[in-house]
Amino acid sequence: MFLQQRSYISTTSSQHVGIIGLGQMGGRMADNLRKKGHNLVVCDPVPDNVQKQVDQGGAVAASTPKEVAEQCDTIITMLPSTAIVENVYLGDNGVHEALRSEHLLLDSSTIDPIFTKKLSKELHDRGATFVDAPVSGGVAGAQNGTLTFMVGGEAEEFERVKPLLKAMGKNLVHCGGSCMYMRMDA
């Protein structure tokens, strides 16, 4: 049984940050976190993506999302589809198998908002903090650290993720609760 009371930790550069998904966007986001002094634990199904991060220093490889969760209190995911996000968080060797109340989980994937709301509720019910923060700005924004993050989560959760988001982006928009970015007018 997970504790309902959350102990809030600082997201300083001295702790390891997990990054799951090191493709065009996630790899560049990881680069920016490392440049800001964060030590990383990285996971991706493409071994070359993981090795690139390890070779650049400041990153340790993990074989599964569960291993990332065992080593980090803070995990960022940047994944290409709803099915992959579901597998990473809830599948075999997924984050949920090592979930603790200390976990701060931040998903920057652009996926199905109905699933995101369900995932948010499930992870919150298990005691973890889950924030959805899809991005705009593309690969160039990820490379240059100028992404815009549209953050869905409670105010105190938004405050908690700000230092990490500022390491990877320029504009932070708090949209309210989970998936509220979907209700913003264009």
Image (cartoon, rainbow, N blue to C red):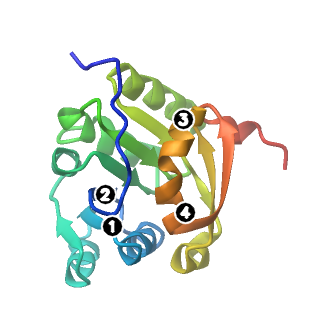
Q: SS for tag 4? A: helix
Mark 3 to mark 1 CA distance (whole Å):
22 Å
Q: Which mark is residue 38?
A: 1
Q: SS for tag 2? A: strand
- In terms of depth relative to the viewer, which is nearer, 164 or 76? 164
Q: Amino acid at mark 2?
A: Val
Q: Which mark is residue 17?
A: 2
Q: Give the residue drawn at x 51%, y 35%.
A: 116
Where does residue 26 sit, x and y in percent of width and height?
Answer: 42, 66
Q: Residues within 10 Å of mark 3 (few under 14, many from 20)?
A: few
Where does residue 91 sit, x and y in percent of width and height?
Answer: 25, 37
- Going from the N terminus, do you reach mark 3 or mark 1 first? 1
- Going from the N terminus, do you reach mark 3 or mark 4 first? 3
- Going from the N terminus, do you reach mark 3 or mark 2 first? 2
Q: Amino acid at mark 3?
A: Glu
Mark 4 to mark 2 CA distance (whole Å):
14 Å
* Residue 94 seen by the camera: yes
Q: Determine whether label 4 and label 2 are within 8 Å by CB.
A: no
- Going from the N terminus, do you reach mark 4 or mark 1 first? 1
Where does residue 75 sit, x and y in percent of width and height?
Answer: 34, 50
Q: Which mark is residue 156?
A: 3
